[in-house]
Image (tube, grey):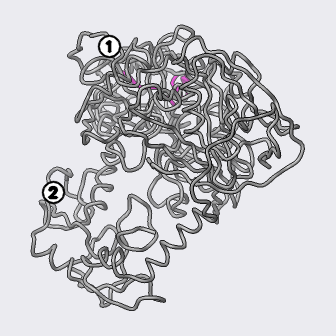
Amino acid sequence: LCCECGQVHLLLDNHLYNFQDEVDDELICHICLQPLLQPMDTPCGHTYCFKCLENFMQEYNFCPMDRQKLSFQQCHKSSLLVRNLLDKLIVFCPFKAECQQTMQRCELEAHLQNRCPGFKKYKSELQRKKNPISKGKEDPPPKAETNTPKDPEVPSGGPSLVAESSAAAVVSLGTAEPGLVNPAFEETEEGESLIQKCNYFFLVAETTTIEIHREDPEEELGMRIVGGKDTPLGNIVVQEVLRDSVVAADGRIAPGDHILEVNGVNISSVTHCQAVSFLRHPGPVLHLMVLQEKGFSNKTSQQDSTSATNREVIHVTLVKRDRSEPLGIKLIRKTDEAGIFILDLLEGGLAAKNGKLSRNDRVLSINGQDLRQGTPEAAAQIIQTTESRVNFVILRQSGVQLSDAVEDSSTSNSSSSSSSNGGSPVHHRRRLDQNHYRRKSNYQKGYVSHEKTVAIKKEPKESLGITIGGGRDNKNKLPIYVTSVQPIGCLFRDGRIKRGDVLLSINGIDLTHLNYYEAVSALKSNAASHSVILKALEIVTLNSPEPSLDIKEQGFGWSPLWITWLGLPSYLHCCQDIVLSKGNLESWGFSIVGGFEESKGNQPFFIKTIVPGTPAFRDRKLKCGDEIVAVNGVPAIGMSNSELIPMLKEQRNKVTLTVVSWPGSLV
């Protein structure tokens, strides 16, 4: 429940209220059709909720009522008189069973926090669920007297780490104390670096199973996804949820969620195209398991665990070359079971090279410290304070089939750990005063692009017979691309222009900087000629195409997969600057993957996660899957992960990120 209005709603949506009387139509937002919240006036004389208008303007550039051209910057707060009238509307307390009070809307939050017996009861029940058994202070962990701990327990899961867990908290520890550097936080075991300056805070995420129902089994879910094991992102991540879609109506999936399973099939280690195929599969019911970021917390809860059979205890010793060397292990805890489990092993890391630890192993002890009731932060402290030998006792459920995710060289992205105090040397680089930051365009192994020139003789009245999408006025500022080739035009007869081709020019007229309507006009005017010369860029896959990706072809609504945009040369990129500001004790709130590695060469930096409640989340311009090409004007090309992280951490209160944003694949 929202602590401000006491009702259930999406984090980015408006608060909900139960009004005592019917509200005058003049005080209603004509986007959400609810009484106005944080009212904003447009120059054309209409008033909308701040959040409603902001969300609308991300998609469109006109007023919803009269469709006059409009930008969000032209709008301003409504007068104090209007805001006061709205704040004084009488509402009921949402906890009707325990509280029948009415009050002004502006007084509801204070009522809930300080006076409402219903909300107090709700918080007590919530706290009791989080801590079902109060154990008081824990005794200090005993030293192990034997090599095998007594009464070992094992998770009762199946092949997937979270198969039987409704919620698993992924915890990373950050601290400014010397000797407690946690590589799983500063530089996580997937090469994922969290830009964070908090003291002793944890990044918490939970897995949950979501059941999506569709009246029409063929209907799109209505979300865009990025990632896949054939990209530096590794996991499949939700980039955007479309308005009025099946997923939006359900309300439980949000941008930044990681999709782990689809109808019982583990997609955490499949290619982007395979994931799209799974998610586009028609059916009335879809079962999704997702990992959702919950933000930072400074506490963890303890729950009892259940015992299981079919287990074996294994002893593993890893030898560090020095105290600061990371082991390359990502640890998690499950909220329905006590203890610590191995989520992943960093490719090329010490643990992966040793080969004796596996995903889903439960850690019973480290260096004799009993961790059967332990937490990932306790394990991290033991590992970081160990000079050389790290002795693990782990519990493994026999018969568990492990995912082959870590066997694929493109699954995870390892890099050197960044310094905990931000003091790692940063090589000063020349700032580029240009709109495009060049990088090798075909770093994506499965895709190559090549330019082609198509010259056609035609009748003056014969149409080209293509439909197009994109345009620099699009919110992603895409180049013009072909969405369909109709069987009635000269290009279909010629056969060389294909759906998905990026159009560069027609009869010498450059199309790469035009908006959609300018491009349509240029194509129509030149189609009247006896001859047409088209230059286009074709992006092709080196592997066999996924046969199921064209099943849900939507005609004019077709758009390329996210992964194909990554093969575009840099001169077709349209960069935008995103300025983030934060307080001294805040995290920037995003994680990145990518960067230079000796084994893989130069890879772009991608935004992998955006943490709720942080500056990156509040700004709402940065998206998962965005490529960072520069920081404060300094190009990121050629940098390693351990170079870029200290550079970001040095920025105290403000940073300018230059990014390229491609739309995720629609499923």
Instruction: Work out whether residue 417 or residue 288 is closer to the camera in this orientation and state it.
Output: 417
Residue assigned mark 2: 75
Instruction: Work out whether residue 107 or residue 560 is closer to the camera in this orientation and state it.
Output: 107
- The residue sitting at 51% across, 47% down in the picture is 204
Q: Is residue 502 above or below residue 247?
A: above
State the mark number for residue 86: none
- The residue sitting at 52% across, 25% down in the picture is 191
* Quarter-of-image position of residue 411: top right
Q: Look at label 2 and name its amino acid.
A: Cys
- The residue sitting at 46% across, 88% down in the picture is 98
Q: Is residue 20 visible?
A: yes
**Residue 496 x, y percent position in the rendering:** 54, 21
Badge 1 element:
loop
- Please provide the residue range marked out in magenta: 493-504
Q: Is residue 457 visible?
A: no
Residue assigned mark 1: 426
Q: Is residue 541 magenta?
A: no
Badge 2 element:
loop
Q: Is residue 221 above or below residue 430?
A: below
Count of number-bearing discs: 2
Instruction: Work out whether residue 374 or residue 310 is closer to the camera in this orientation and state it.
Output: 374
